[in-house]
Amino acid sequence: MEANKGKGDQGMQNPSGQVDRPVSFHFLESMLPKAVKRRVHALKRLQVQCANIEAKFYEEVHELERKYAALYQPLFDKRRDIVTGTVEPTDEECEWHSDRDEEEELAEEVKEKAAIEDAKKEEATPEEDPKGIPEFWLTIFKSVDMLSDMLQEHDEPILKHLKDIQVKFSEPGEPMSFTLEFHFEPNGYFNNAVLTKVYKMKSEPDPSDPFSFEGPEIIDCEGCQIDWHKGKDVTVKTIKKKQKHKGRGTVRTVTKQVPNDSFFNFFNPVKAPPDGEMDEDSEFTLATDFEIGHFFRERIVPRAVLYFTGEALEDDESFEEEELEEGEEEEQDEEGDDDDDEGDFDPKA
Amino acid sequence: MEANKGKGDQGMQNPSGQVDRPVSFHFLESMLPKAVKRRVHALKRLQVQCANIEAKFYEEVHELERKYAALYQPLFDKRRDIVTGTVEPTDEECEWHSDRDEEEELAEEVKEKAAIEDAKKEEATPEEDPKGIPEFWLTIFKSVDMLSDMLQEHDEPILKHLKDIQVKFSEPGEPMSFTLEFHFEPNGYFNNAVLTKVYKMKSEPDPSDPFSFEGPEIIDCEGCQIDWHKGKDVTVKTIKKKQKHKGRGTVRTVTKQVPNDSFFNFFNPVKAPPDGEMDEDSEFTLATDFEIGHFFRERIVPRAVLYFTGEALEDDESFEEEELEEGEEEEQDEEGDDDDDEGDFDPKA
């Protein structure tokens, strides 16, 4: 900073005439004349007041989101009814233009060839009149890396019964949170009609660190108890262990239940300890959980059909950034790059 | 997608039991049975309705930002008054705790040594009673890469007169935009008290590409005319060119004015052509301009003091991401990493 005003720039100058950034550490801030430092402290106090006003701003944004959730809901209900086959949309409701005539023709050709193949396979279980959009949500899970990472083979038959995912927002006066509701058709795996995951948020600046406040942040989450039918719990597996008696030398087989990888562990998350201190692995797992919750809320639920078709995946490169391996370059989605991936419309006209 | 339901997964399975993502191109969407595709189109129509509702949501967010801008304004006015030295804050208004006693002590030592050195230099222009916070905004420009990139040596004496930067939001019913106002003290360079930059935004989905809508987006900007005093315009320079007369062989010296690099070109931006088509360089320049406008609005103006001290720079790694060279890894700001860069408080408690 300009602690020595009038004595020339602190910053160094390079030959081009551009000025290099001065070293601006808090250390230097201490180098300011007392009178100036005092005023900087006054600005910091004002900044704390700003942070507190900002917290109220975010509360009002949350309120706005709740208000709009109610406006989207009839459309999402309609979506659910179409997906489940409860309601058949009218022709008018299905009108959709596509420029991709060539691609449609090609698709028709491939389909015809595939149909000949399928006709042979289809004798056992003909599905010529599929109801709704079969496996709508399961397809989304499989198409989106962040979700497919959680998915195991044994989860799939269960997720075929997933008929809707909804987002609910906390009421005014309640601590800020949102809830993901996974609505299932009756199925042979568990009794629950709805599985829930609540994400709790911190929506105010931390008085001991007011400047790190950047808006509401997920800080904890809570799952739900799944009422599994006997023998259907995919989150556990039974293993057999041979044990040798130390004295007698006889061997016995012991069976025990151990945790099994499954999407449904999503409803039994690691708990964040009250003091905020946990091991690195748990912290990472929890952070990933929070990302997933946020992703469901912000992207999947509002735009589900675009994940079903894959259109949204092209736009989401930035969201998947977290998953890149170290050293891997993030590809910029440039105009004209992904002609073969285009949706019905050019992403950028 | 599950075009061939009942005939096994389209997706391939790897040995771990996890399911690989099916190839979900729009091409495959065309592979769906007609009845199902029809319903997918119905969902897309619903999605367009969602996008239109979303546009209204963002209008209301803009309204909320305008409402809160009015709530922040008294604090920002106070900031300006303290920075310019118009108002001296009371002791109470300057109270600020710091844990960094050790660093304070060290700073004091260094300061004492520097003071002895300075005492010698200070005879010519003593600045023992600096007014306000001298060069507050200029220091911010020099500390923030995105801004220092625009800064030339000859801009600095002018920017010493910058006393405030304000953000104004468009009114309801107007096309969505925001304006940056750069307020200057009277100075020997130009007559304007305020230099303005307006950023115009697109806040509705493009009917021909409704799904690319991700909220309001800057699409154009407009500067202002600077009323430079004679000979003080730093955005132009005079160069001399020798010209040789073809016939006679005589040489003459011609002076001409050419553009000069300067921050003040910020107020004379490249114009986006109505049809949206421009060369790559101009497109890049404009995109950078939009980033800068967004950065002033979202980060600099709301949190100026934290850029002055440098605290905000640690948090802003993600904002500077755009400026990384290809191949350069983005450093994750981990807890405990930057102990020497800590502000008065730990960024993450």
Image (cartoon, coloured by chain):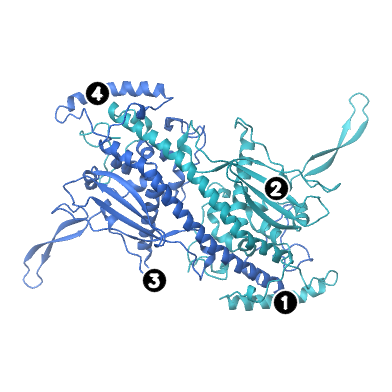
Chain colours: A cyan, B blue
Q: Does the residue at mark 1 contact the one at mark 2 (Cβ under 8 Å)?
A: no
Q: Would you say the residues marked 2 and 4 are in contact, meaning their CB atoms lie under 8 Å apart?
A: no
Q: CA distance from mark 3 to mark 2?
A: 48 Å
Tag 2 or tag 1, which sits nearer the N-term?
A: 1
Q: Is residue A85 above or below residue B73?
A: below
Measured from the top left, where is residue A169 in percent x and y? Answer: 61, 49
The chain letter for the residue carrying disc 4 is B
Can you tell which of label 3 and label 2 is closer to the viewer? 2
- A92 vs A275: above or below: below
Q: Provide the residue designation for mark 3.
A: B275
Q: CA distance from mark 1 to mark 2?
A: 43 Å
Q: Residues within 10 Å of mark 4 (few under 14, many from 20)?
A: some
Instruction: Point out which mark residue B115 bears.
Output: 4
Q: Do discs 2 and 4 belong to a common subunit?
A: no
Q: CA distance from mark 3 to mark 1?
A: 44 Å
Q: Nearer the viewer, mark 3 or mark 1?
A: 3
Residue A214 in view in this figure: no
